[in-house]
Image (cartoon, helix red, strand yellow):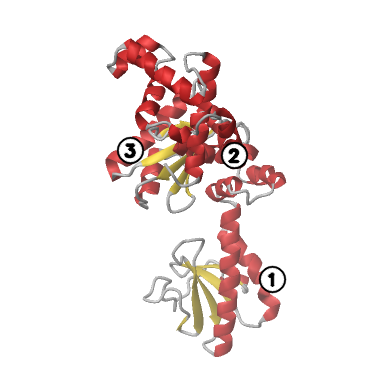
Amino acid sequence: MSSRIFQSVIIQMKDATDRCMGVADEQGIVVACSELGMIGTKLEDFRGVQGEYPEQVFTSGQRTYKPVGGANSRPDYAVFVDGRDSSARCVCILAAVAFQEAKINYEEKHNKTIFIKNIISDNILPGDIYVRAKELHFATDVPRAVFLIRQTDRADMSALETVSEMFPDRQKDFVLSVNENDLVLIKELTAVSENNKELYDIANAIEEKLRTDLNIRCVIGIGTTARHLRVLADKYKEAQVAIDVGKVFDTEKTVIHYDNLGIGRLIYQLPTTLCEMFLGEVFKKKPIEALDQETLYTINKFFENNLNVSETSRKLFVHRNTLVYRLEKIKKLTGLDLREFDHAIIFKVALMVKKYLNSQNGEF
């Protein structure tokens, strides 16, 4: 396919010079040339594209050569121009630039991984997605999951290779490096269980693999299932939100699904000024900062045990009356009786809002 691209460029450049020019592969076989009769022949004076200085112009026999690579690849072709003079060198360099750009553009246009990366990065117009997908023979409406894998303690380039090896089907599953810390897995799904168990199993397997093989700690955000290619970017953003919200409200979790963020997702989208107003309205008597750590620990345990006084006192290893006394003390300080469901909801939301404000201020 590259020979057709190169030949197209040669046709466009042919009128600019009377020199014979062309492209040879690693073995010196001419794959494209301004003199059609040379295509398929071997250049006897060809020295190869993998010399000591593979990117520099060199001469051999009666020709000037310049290696040409692809997108992030080693040189695998060489441009040649008849002659060893400065004009041949100039034509050779200009032709190499044209050939390399044409090759890279073609590879990007016909590379499924780059296509997927352009979609999630919003680097392609929605109207072009269907056209490109058709060119690549890419199924547009199969279910796909988006996993954002963020390395938290340190970044290791080996993580990309490790995750890629877990999903070897290069036609259906795509592992991309987004930045130094983030990898993205786009996984084609055969069926999606209602409770997303399959997605959690995949994410947990990735987390365990990176932790055991590379000693890398990570957190994985999962977006809702994409039913069409055009919504992949939205699902990628959901995976980002899952990690960001989880960092505030679910710090102990390593796998977080966008669908399970609950009220934390709503709070995360609120302006900080509105959050501060809410806290001021809830805690009219004294600010939430007036509650000491022991009191906050008691409150959290009370919530964990579904507002059950007997169960909470058992878990705290205190007498039931001691817990009741603490709850009465909280009521006096805040005006909220946590034994009443409505008050408990307000207090729980207030704690989450405070946690969110702390995260915005860099306090965790």
Sequence-first disc among 3 and 2: 3
Q: Position of residue 147 (x, y in %)?
A: 48, 38
How crowded pointer 1 is (Cα within 10 Å; few <14, some 14-19, many 20+) is rated as few
Residue depicted at 41% across the width and 11% down the height? 308
Do labels 2 and 1 touch, CB within 8 Å?
no
Tag shown at residue 283: none
Picture quarter with the C terminus:
top left
> Could you give the CA–CA distance between mark 3 and mark 2, rounded to whole angstroms?
25 Å
From the viewer's side, name the closer residue of 59 and 339.
Answer: 339
Residue 209 - label: 3
Identify residue type, mark 1.
Gln
Rendered residue at 56%/79% (across/down): 92
Q: Is residue 339 left or right of residue 277?
A: left
Question: Residue at label 1?
Answer: 12
Q: Nearer the viewer, residue 243 or 47?
A: 243
User: Quarter of the image holding residue 107?
Assistant: bottom right
In this view of the protein, can residue 188 be seen by the observer? no
Query: At numbered mark 3, what does the secondary structure look like: helix, strand or loop?
Result: helix
> Of tags 3 and 1, which is closer to the observer?
3
On residue 232, the disc is: 2
2 vs 1, front mark: 2
Residue at horizontal 38 percent and vertical 16 percent from the top: 325
**Does residue 330 appear left or right of residue 94 in this picture?**
left
Q: Position of residue 87 (x, y in %)?
A: 59, 87
- The answer to whether residue 197 is seen in the rendering is yes
Q: Position of residue 190 (x, y in %)?
A: 51, 26
Q: Nearer the viewer, residue 120 or 114?
A: 120
Q: CA distance from mark 3 to mark 1?
A: 51 Å
Q: Identify the residue at horizontal 33%, vertical 38% (top origin).
A: 209
Front-most of residues 47 and 49? 49
Helix, strand or loop at mark 2: helix
Q: Is residue 27 above or below residue 184?
A: below
